[in-house]
Image (tube, rainbow, N blue to C red):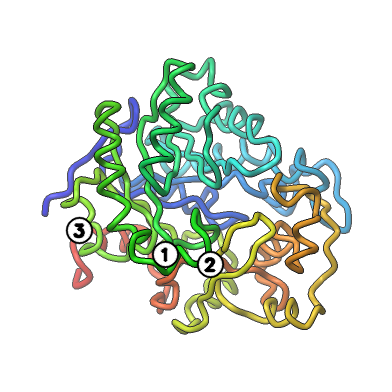
């Protein structure tokens, strides 16, 4: 199959591969810049930018962590990440991933536009008011992540009041890393698997115009990419596989956790966000079960559904603190998110080599 470029708004994506946004600090300047340089769409995670450059862009620390959402989602940190990514990819399209469930969502979308994002991608909720925050940036394309045709229909109806429709849609199935758009039970039911939820979304997208549909969740190789493009998708989003690259911004210990993991190590966990989340079972989960995990202090106030640490205390851990510990490579207390195929990572390669494998086959 010859892979074709496609457009997201005014932006041409040369190769039909979007690198999924991964935070804290997994997809920042080096990874996202390298993916865009190679013709895919690099995606910078806006989560935890207060930790960038050894917390240089954080104005207040408490117990060594960025205090409040203003510092955890540091605008200066985000600007610096985009500036450094641009040094790698030049003027090629570059995206920002902004989770809808975060505190200060609108402000972080505006920060992303000001930092130079060409495309904003939003999941972790239904971003029914997303266009409200991009006024003044008409060239910035908006891409919501959905898990059903119903969700897409609701977004399109709500966005009509802004005279706007999504520039593309990402459909994420329940094999992705991190938070899922499904209940724990639905993650294992056939009707919610990616290949079954994509066709209705494609049909719904056609009703609203020529909206590209992008498949995400558990996609691993060229064969997977071809399968979803043959179903009618314009491209795919892949995150976990990019962790296995030299350029990935994750700590080397983070990469080692995935490389050394087995299939049975990858589980769905309870999360303070209120949705199941997939990651590698490590010492942290043992500590949570034994009630010896680090105390929840809610220093960063990162996500609205956590209710200032109330949900974190209920499940036994703070997601901001544990993801940032993973960013620093702290195996005992870090939370290591991965998609269902994370155990298949066996070595590190360059982004250039990975893109070649994905587009031309593993033998190359």
Q: CA distance from mark 3 to mark 1?
A: 16 Å
Q: In the structure shown, which secondary structural element does the residue marked by tag 2 occupy?
A: strand
- Dot 2 alpha-carbon crowd within 10 angstroms: few under 14, some 14 to 19, many 20 or more: many
Left or right: 260 in relation to 230: right
Q: Which image quadrant is residue 298 in? A: bottom right
Image coordinates for residue 241, horizontal then vertical, percent:
40, 65
Q: Where is residue 162 drawn, in percent x and y?
A: 48, 17
Sequence order check, earlier mark of 2 and 1: 1
Of 84 and 26, nearer the camera is: 26
Label 3 element class: helix
Query: Residue 278, which numbered label?
Result: 2
In depth, the one of 166 and 197 nearer the eye is 197
- Left or right of 317: which side holds 343? left
Please indicate, yes or no, whether residue 246 appears anywhere in the rendered image: no
Disc 2 to disc 3, how far (Cα)?
Answer: 24 Å
Looking at the rendered structure, which numbered label has been put on residue 227?
A: 3
Q: Calculate the distance from the C-alpha at mark 2 to the C-alpha at mark 1.
A: 8 Å
- Residue under the image location 65 percent in, 70 percent down: 329
Placement of the C terminus among the 4 image quadrants: bottom left
Residue in view at x 56 percent, y 41 percent? 98
Q: Are marks 2 and 1 in contact (CB under 8 Å)?
A: yes
Residue density around tag 3, few if under 14, some if 14–19, many if 20 or more, within 10 Å: few
Q: Position of residue 316 (x, y in %)?
A: 76, 69
149 lies above or below 272: above
What residue would you read off at disc 1? 175
With 197 as the anchor, is 245 left or right in this view?
right
Q: Image quarter for residue 4?
A: top left
């Amino acid at each position: 199959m010859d892979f074709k470029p496609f457009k997201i708004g005014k932006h041409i994506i040369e190769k039909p591969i979007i690198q999924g946004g991964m935070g804290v600090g997994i997809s920042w300047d080096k990874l996202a810049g390298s993916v865009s340089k190679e013709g895919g769409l690099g995606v910078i995670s806006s989560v935890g930018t207060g930790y960038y450059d050894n917390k240089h862009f954080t104005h207040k620390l408490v117990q060594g962590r960025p205090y409040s959402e203003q510092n955890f989602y540091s605008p200066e940190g985000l600007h610096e990440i985009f500036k450094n990514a641009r040094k790698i990819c030049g003027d090629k399209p570059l995206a920002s991933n902004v989770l809808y469930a975060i505190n200060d969502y609108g402000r972080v979308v505006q920060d992303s536009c000001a930092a130079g994002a060409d495309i904003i991608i939003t999941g972790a909720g239904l971003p029914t008011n997303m266009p409200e925050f991009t006024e003044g940036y008409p060239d910035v394309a908006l891409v919501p992540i959905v898990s059903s045709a119903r969700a897409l229909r609701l977004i399109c109806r709500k966005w009509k009041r802004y005279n706007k429709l999504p520039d593309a849609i990402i459909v994420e199935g329940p094999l992705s890393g991190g938070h899922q758009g499904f209940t724990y039970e639905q993650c294992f039911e056939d009707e919610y698997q990616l290949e079954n939820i994509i066709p209705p979304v494609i049909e719904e997208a056609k009703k609203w115009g020529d909206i590209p549909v992008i498949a995400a969740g558990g996609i691993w190789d060229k064969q997977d990419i071809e399968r979803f493009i043959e179903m009618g998708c314009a491209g795919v989003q892949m995150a976990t596989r990019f962790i296995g690259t030299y350029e990935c911004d994750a700590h080397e210990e983070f990469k080692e956790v995935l490389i050394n993991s087995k299939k049975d190590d990858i589980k769905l966990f309870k999360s303070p966000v209120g949705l199941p989340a997939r990651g590698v079972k490590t010492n942290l989960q043992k500590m949570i079960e034994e009630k010896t995990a680090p105390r929840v202090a809610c220093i960063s106030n990162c996500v609205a559904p956590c209710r200032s640490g109330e949900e974190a205390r209920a499940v036994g851990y703070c997601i901001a603190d544990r993801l940032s510990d993973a960013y620093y490579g702290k195996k005992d207390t870090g939370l290591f998110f991965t998609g269902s195929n994370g155990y298949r990572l066996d070595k590190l390669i360059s982004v250039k080599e990975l893109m070649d494998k994905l587009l031309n086959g593993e033998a190359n």
